[in-house]
Image (spheres, rainbow, N blue to C red):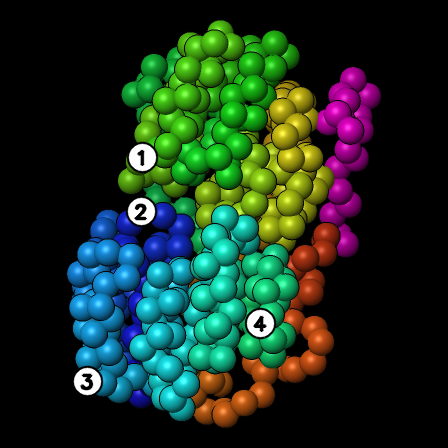
Amino acid sequence: MIKVILLIPTLDHSGAEKQFALLAARLPRDEFDVHAVTLTRGGPYESMIRDAGIRLTNLNKRMKFDPLALWRLKSLLEAEKPDILHSWIFAANAYGRLVAGKKRRPKVLVSERCVDSWKSPWQLWLDRKQIGRTTRLVGNSQSVAEFYRSLGVPAEKLVVIPNGVEMPNGPPVDRDRVLAEFQIPPGSRVVGFAGRLARQKRVRDIVWAMQLLKQLTDRVYLMVVGDGPERASLIELARHMACDHLVRFVGHRDDAARLIGLFNVFWLASDFEGMSNSMMEAMAAGVPVVASDIPPNRELLVDGQTGFLVKVGDSVGMAQFADRILADPALARRLGEVGRERMRTNFSVERMVSLHAELYRQVVSEDGGGFGGTGSSLPVLIPASIAKTRADEPPVPPHAEGHLRCAE
């Protein structure tokens, strides 16, 4: 039995926390003894972990550097003697490596979930200082792994395990009834976004795209699912641009995945990501995607096959491609079907859990050596075929008579 402690700051309703809870709940119980630990507090994903019969402990961290929480974590490791300590996100990664040190056990794995260009110099300094205490760094995309390699993490310590997405399997939803909850008329088309309303997500570009889209077509609404520091300014922007009557800011929703499934087109305008859970949920639901052309999005979306990529900040391109999809039901259906199959085949929760389980087995059984090989290339767990277009389905031409490609 391999003893694993999974450590994360909180169980708030966000992407990394969901992946953490899915992993904790679904690791094989006959092979792994799992103990989930939060640094600061629990949150909405507590129930998923507890319902699976997994132990859950909160260390009650009260400040950025909390010696008492550090002592509690040290005491927990001494009492549990885990084979693996797997931490997620900066605070947990810092605390975990500080406490574990360079001992042979536990093996220390850290998960990084984004291209963390937001980190301050002292945080990057601490990350570098703790490389020697890191058995493996797990990125959820090739872009994340490349970012941390650029900070000095050796290639043989880097692993890529993509996020897993749950495939929708519930009964059909009465679309018009649900949309009526948001004062959207029956038969309307909905373009949507789901995520944190923060600068990184460039939701202002999405509001601009909606202002353009309403001039290209009718009966179309924008639904923005999520909350964050830019909410008030985004509402004001929609009002200023005279499209507020077509925009619905619905706030944080526990049923976000269900609402995403009602979209006709999903928009994602971020200038950096790790691997977008909401975009994966849209593709799993068969919703065509128009997204910013950044490396993490290219790992998920095959341009012309599951949706379209546009340059960061290109609201015109987002509007044009959304209009094209809305005007061509056959195209929308084909994009959606290919996207759903891509998620089911390559980005399932089962695959995410299986890859973590294999990583745990290897780091426990091996001293040294890279996971998946060593050398100059990253030890990546994503088969190269995933990143390629499907040979049996040629991409939709980016130009079509009567439709302009996004502004260059």
Q: Which residue is mark 3?
A: 79
Q: Nearer the viewer, residue 178 or 213?
A: 213
Q: Are marks 2 and 1 in contact (CB under 8 Å)?
A: yes
Q: Which residue is mark 1?
A: 252
Please, what is the three-letter code of the amino acid marked with disc 4?
A: Val
Give the x, y percent position of residue 42.
21, 55
Residue 399 lies in the magenta-colored region: yes
Q: Which residue is mark 2?
A: 13
Between the residue at mark 2 and the residue at mark 1, the CA separation in whole angstroms equals 9 Å
Between the residue at mark 2 and the residue at mark 4, the CA separation in whole angstroms equals 29 Å
Q: Nearer the viewer, residue 290 or 112?
A: 112
Q: Secondary structure at mark 3?
A: helix
**Residue occupying the point 19% across, 73% down:** 72
Between the residue at mark 4 and the residue at mark 1, the CA separation in whole angstroms equals 36 Å
Give the x, y percent position of residue 309.
67, 38
Between the residue at mark 1 and the residue at mark 3, the CA separation in whole angstroms equals 39 Å
Neighbourhood count class around disc 3 (C-alpha, 10 Å): few under 14, some 14–19, many 20 upward = few
**Residue occupying the point 30% across, 36% down:** 253
Q: Secondary structure at mark 1?
A: loop
Q: State which mark lies toward you, 4 or 1.
A: 4
Is most of the magenta stretch helix, strand or loop? loop
Which residues, given as a range, are shown in magenta? 391-408
